[in-house]
Image (cartoon, helix red, strand yellow):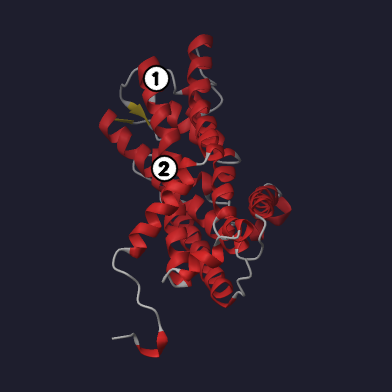
């Protein structure tokens, strides 16, 4: 029996196949693989340079503790990549979600398959989440392995002056990755919305980067302090509070709320735009 209202039935497993196809598209592209190599190279460069010099940067807690515990290579790498490299990686994927399909002329044919627009948009958002998580875990994983190999895996010093066991340190590192993934997904949701506004993926990517960099510049201006907490990048570095004992939540909780709010608002905006958009290519 045909579905009521003339709606097309979605074949069982179509969403899962579409999701796997989206992930293959992301992880098989050479430019994305090249970007992954850049992300992975940074913790290696940090670890080798500090190993050669024999000491970390005493003015920075994350860099100063690298010679004490190799896990700090991962934490330092995440810290230095969060302002630009990781957002660039996410912006590239987010800008390509819808605009890339439209630019290549595949969006119309993709929608010919019985996949409604809402389902397609959610699949692309889910792929963004997976990519953001994999990017942070790649940096953390490479940094952790190289750091432990070069500097060992002893107790993990905390900002509070206490120490954690190595297992607890790994757990804190995973929490850092989870928090930063939330922050990057929020940026990705902004990119998803922008991607529905244009058929040029490069323009969408640049626009997302402009948003991220402008937010960071505004956040650095003390004259604009009243708006700082509402900026999408303001809470990114609150992850250092996960290195306190006990964990401080004064900045972490607002950071989580901010990331979830940006994700919800811009995913809804992308849905409103995409479901009413005239697909011409």
- Residue furthest to the right in view is 223
Circle 1 SS class: loop
User: Which residue is at 51% across, 41% downward?
Assistant: 29
Q: Position of residue 235 (x, y in %)?
A: 53, 51
Question: Which residue corresponds to mark 1?
Answer: 68
Looking at the rendering, which quadrant does residue 140 occupy?
Answer: top left
Instruction: First in sequence, mark 2 or 1: give its number.
Output: 1
Looking at the rendering, which quadrant does residue 1 occupy?
Answer: bottom left
Question: Could you tell me how far apart the alpha carbons at marks 2 and 1 are, in whole angstroms?
Answer: 27 Å
The answer to whether residue 271 is above or below residue 84 is below
Numbered label attached to residue 155? none
Q: Residues within 10 Å of mark 2 (few under 14, many from 20)?
A: some
Q: Residues within 10 Å of mark 1 (few under 14, many from 20)?
A: some
Numbered label attached to residue 134? 2
User: Which residue is at 41% across, 50% downward?
Assistant: 130
User: Which residue is at 60% across, 71% downward?
Assistant: 279
The answer to whether residue 215 is above or below residue 35 is below
Task: Tell which of 19 and 268 is nearer to you.
Answer: 19
Q: Position of residue 96 (x, y in %)?
A: 58, 53
The answer to whether residue 115 is above or below residue 70 is below
The answer to whether residue 224 is above or below residue 44 is below
| In the image: residue 173, left or right of residue 233 | left
Is residue 144 in view from this perspective? yes
Look at discs 2 and 1 and give the one toward the viewer: 2
Q: Are marks 2 and 1 in contact (CB under 8 Å)?
A: no
Q: How many marks?
A: 2
Circle 2 SS class: helix
Q: Position of residue 240 (x, y in %)?
A: 46, 40
**Quadrant location of the C terminus?**
bottom right
Q: Position of residue 154 (x, y in %)?
A: 31, 21
């Amino acid at each position: 029996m045909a579905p009521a209202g003339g709606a097309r039935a979605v074949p069982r497993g179509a969403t899962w196949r579409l999701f796997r196809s989206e992930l293959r598209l992301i992880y098989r592209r050479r430019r994305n693989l090249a970007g992954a190599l850049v992300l992975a190279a940074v913790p290696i460069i940090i670890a080798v340079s500090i190993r050669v010099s024999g000491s970390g940067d005493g003015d920075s807690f994350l860099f100063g503790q690298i010679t004490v515990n190799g896990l700090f290579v991962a934490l330092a790498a995440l810290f230095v990549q969060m302002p630009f490299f990781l957002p660039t990686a996410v912006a590239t994927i987010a800008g390509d979600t819808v605009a890339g399909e439209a630019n290549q002329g595949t969006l119309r044919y993709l929608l010919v398959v019985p996949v409604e627009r809402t389902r397609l948009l959610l699949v692309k958002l889910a792929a963004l989440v997976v990519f953001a998580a994999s990017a942070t875990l790649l940096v953390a994983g490479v940094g952790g392995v190289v750091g432990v190999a070069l500097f060992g895996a002893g107790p993990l010093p905390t900002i509070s002056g206490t120490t954690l066991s190595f297992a607890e340190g790994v757990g804190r590192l995973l929490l850092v990755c989870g928090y930063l993934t939330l922050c990057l997904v929020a940026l990705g949701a902004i990119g998803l919305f922008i991607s529905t506004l244009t058929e040029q993926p490069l323009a969408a990517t640049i626009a997302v980067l402009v948003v991220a960099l402008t937010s960071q510049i505004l956040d650095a201006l003390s004259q604009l302090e009243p708006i700082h907490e509402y900026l999408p990048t303001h809470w990114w570095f609150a992850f250092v509070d996960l290195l306190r004992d006990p964990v401080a939540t004064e900045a972490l909780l607002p950071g989580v709320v901010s990331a979830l709010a940006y994700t919800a608002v811009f995913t809804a905006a992308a849905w409103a735009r995409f479901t009413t958009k005239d697909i011409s290519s």
